[in-house]
Amino acid sequence: MAISVAAALHGSLNADHYAPCLASTSNSTRFSYLSSLQLPRDLRRLRIGNKGFKSGMRPRVLPPVEAKKQTFNSFDDLLAKSDKPVLVDFYATWCGPCQFMVPILEEVSASMNDKIQVVKIDTEKYPSIADKYRIEALPTFIIFKNGKPCDRFEGALNAKQLIERIEASLQVKQ
C-alpha cells in the first residue's frame, strides 16, 4: 500500500523563515526539513494527554459552592419531613450542563427560600433513587409536593426560566 502525503506552507512557515537553518544543509536534508510538520508556536503548546486536550492556558477557577449538607435516613424521609415543596436536581459530577446549573440553583434557592427547598442528588452515588424515579437524562428536576412528584423537567435552564417553571408548577398544583 502506498501512502502519499502533501504539505502546504503556511504564511508563517515559509521557506525564507528557515533559510538560515537550511543554508548549510544538503538538498535531501533541506527537503526533509521542509516536509516535516512545523506548527506555529501557539499550537506547539497544545498537547493531547490521557484526559483530552491540554493547553498552556491556566485552568478556569470557579467560585466555591457552599451547600448545606443534611443527612436523612432515606430520601422518602427527607420528602416527608419537608414543610415546603422540594425541588430535586438529579445530577452527575461528569455532566457539563449539571455543573452549569450549580450557580443557577444557588441563585434560585436564595430567591425562593421561603417557597421551595432545593436538594441535589448525585445519580452516581445514589443509583437506586435515580432508578426509582426513572432518571434517564441529566440534569433532571422533579418538584415534590407533600412527598409526591408534581412536576418533572429535564435540561439546563437559566435562573429566570427555572423560577418561572417552579412558580407555574406550584400555582397549578396547589
Image (spheres, helix red, strand yellow):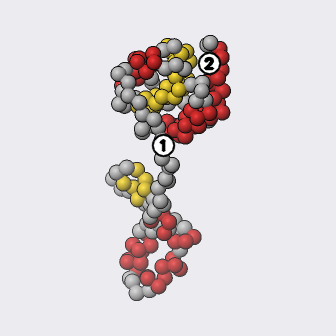
Q: Quadrant of residue 105?
A: top right
Q: Is residue 34 above or below residue 122?
A: below
The number of callouts visible is 2
Q: Secondary structure at mark 1?
A: loop
Tags 1 and 2 touching, CB below 8 Å:
no
Q: Does 117 sit left or right of 23 as displayed?
A: right
Depth check: give the residue in front, 105 or 155: 105
Check disc 2 and report the residue beneath it.
170
Residue occupying image coordinates x 61% and y 29%: 112
Q: Does 161 sit left or right of 35 as displayed?
A: right
Residue at the bottom extreme? 24
Residue 131 appears at what percent x and percent y?
39, 20
Residue occupying image coordinates x 45% and y 35%: 68
Q: Does 37 sit left or right of 174 as displayed?
A: left
Depth check: give the residue in front, 42 or 133: 133
Q: Is residue 103 above or below residue 79?
A: below
Residue occupying image coordinates x 45% and y 62%: 56
Q: Secondary structure at mark 2?
A: helix
Residue 89 appears at what percent x and percent y?
49, 28
Depth check: give the residue in front, 7 or 42: 42
Please say whether residue 100 is visible from this viewpoint.
yes
Which three-letter amino acid code belongs to the residue tagged 2? Leu
Which three-letter amino acid code belongs to the residue tagged 1? Val
Check disc 1 and report the residue beneath it.
65
Depth check: give the residue in front, 150 or 157: 150
Residue 31 appears at what percent x and percent y?
42, 74
Q: Quadrant of the C terminus?
A: top right
Classify 10 Å Cα crowding around label 2: few (below 14), some (14-19), many (20 and above).
some
Residue 100 appears at what percent x and percent y?
53, 40
Q: Give the CA distance from mark 1 to mark 2.
A: 27 Å
Residue occupying image coordinates x 42% and y 34%: 69
Which label is found at residue 148?
none
